Image (cartoon, rainbow, N blue to C red):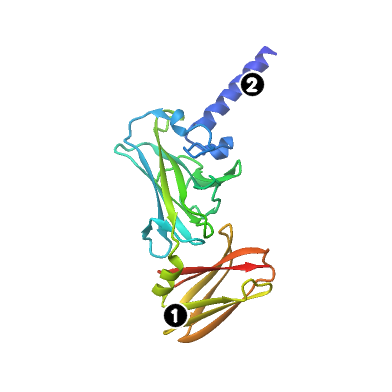
Amino acid sequence: MKLKFIYIFFGLAIFGLATMSNSSGRAAASGVGATTAPGDGTVCTTCHAGGNFGASVDVKLKDLASGEEVTEYVPGVTYAVEVSIGTSVAPAGYGFQVIALQDSDNSSISTWANNVTANTQLTDASGRQYFEQSGIASDNILEAEWTAPAAGTGSVTFYAAGNAVNGTGSTAGDQAVTNEITFTENTTSTSAGLAKLGIRLNTFPNPTVDNLTLMLETEESKDLIVNIYNLEGQKVDGQNVVAQPGENRFQFDVAAYTSGIYFVEITDGANRTSTRFVKH
């Protein structure tokens, strides 16, 4: 019995070291967050300490088409998210975790997708979604996509934790850092976007049951992308259209959509606008 207890003890100890080490994200390993976000568990800086790599962590939102950095989000638009971990001394690798919360109630904006950097993952834990490492990352720039929430959400804060690791398999000698970056909602995006696109726009009927007509007027031919997103920021439909000079009408079958609020986004790749409609 005593020998069995020793085996169990050492097994749990090894498991504990594994989940506390740099190899996997805390949300995936333990089901909790490790940023400074309200409601998260132990902050990563509690365990990962003692290192001196001159570490810092930052989060940037970038336009998917142009790659330009933005300081405000347009409701319903999908952005490239760049998490960067800076150091003055090169570590063996990097770990990180990021979550986006609505400022008004600290609810998770769980619309992450398409993580393209090696050794990263999207993890759902405790009703929240995290972008984090799945193994020690060799890149200090980590990228994924994130879709902004519906109009009226207000400011969103990204809580980020970055970790410069020494690769020994222990938390000792690492340097963990945290940061908070807030993005405000662009409430003038619709009119500004229409002006930049050079179009006039109307959607009807609104509310609708079966079909939605997008009426678009322009003075010159334009290649446009029309995407429809639900209230959670998930894309439910999309078309590439060519608008000719004058009045154009494009129809969407929305009969199978769940009742609720939806957003129509129109972009030419560099500029964009959005409007919303209600499906009964």
Image spot of residue 45 (x, y percent): 43, 31
Q: Picture quarter containing residue 125?
A: top right
Q: Picture quarter containing residue 173?
A: top left
State the residue lying farthest toward the top.
2
Which residue is the site of mark 1? 222
Q: Is residue 21 left or right of residue 15?
A: left
State the residue lying farthest toward the bottom.
246
Of the numbered discs 1 and 2, the one sitting upstream in the chain is 2
Gap between marks 1 and 2 measured at Cα: 67 Å
Which residue is the site of mark 2? 8
| Residue 81 visible in the shown view | no
Q: Tell me the crowding category of disc 2: few under 14, some 14 to 19, or many 20 or more residues within 10 angstroms, Cα based.
A: few
Residue at image coords 56%, 26% = 14
Image spot of residue 36 (x, y percent): 46, 37
Q: Amino acid at mark 2?
A: Ile
Element type where label 2 sits in the image: helix
In the foreground, 102 or 70:
102
Element type where label 1 sits in the image: strand
How many numbered marks have been drawn onto this rendered protein structure? Answer: 2
In the foreground, 267 or 53:
267
Image spot of residue 132 (x, y percent): 49, 43
Image spot of residue 269 (x, y percent): 43, 70
Q: Is residue 114 left or right of residue 6?
A: left
State which quarter of the image contains the C terminus.
bottom right
Q: Tell me the crowding category of disc 1: few under 14, some 14 to 19, or many 20 or more residues within 10 angstroms, Cα based.
A: some
Above or below, comparing residue 185 to residue 219 in the picture: above
Q: Amino acid at mark 1?
A: Lys
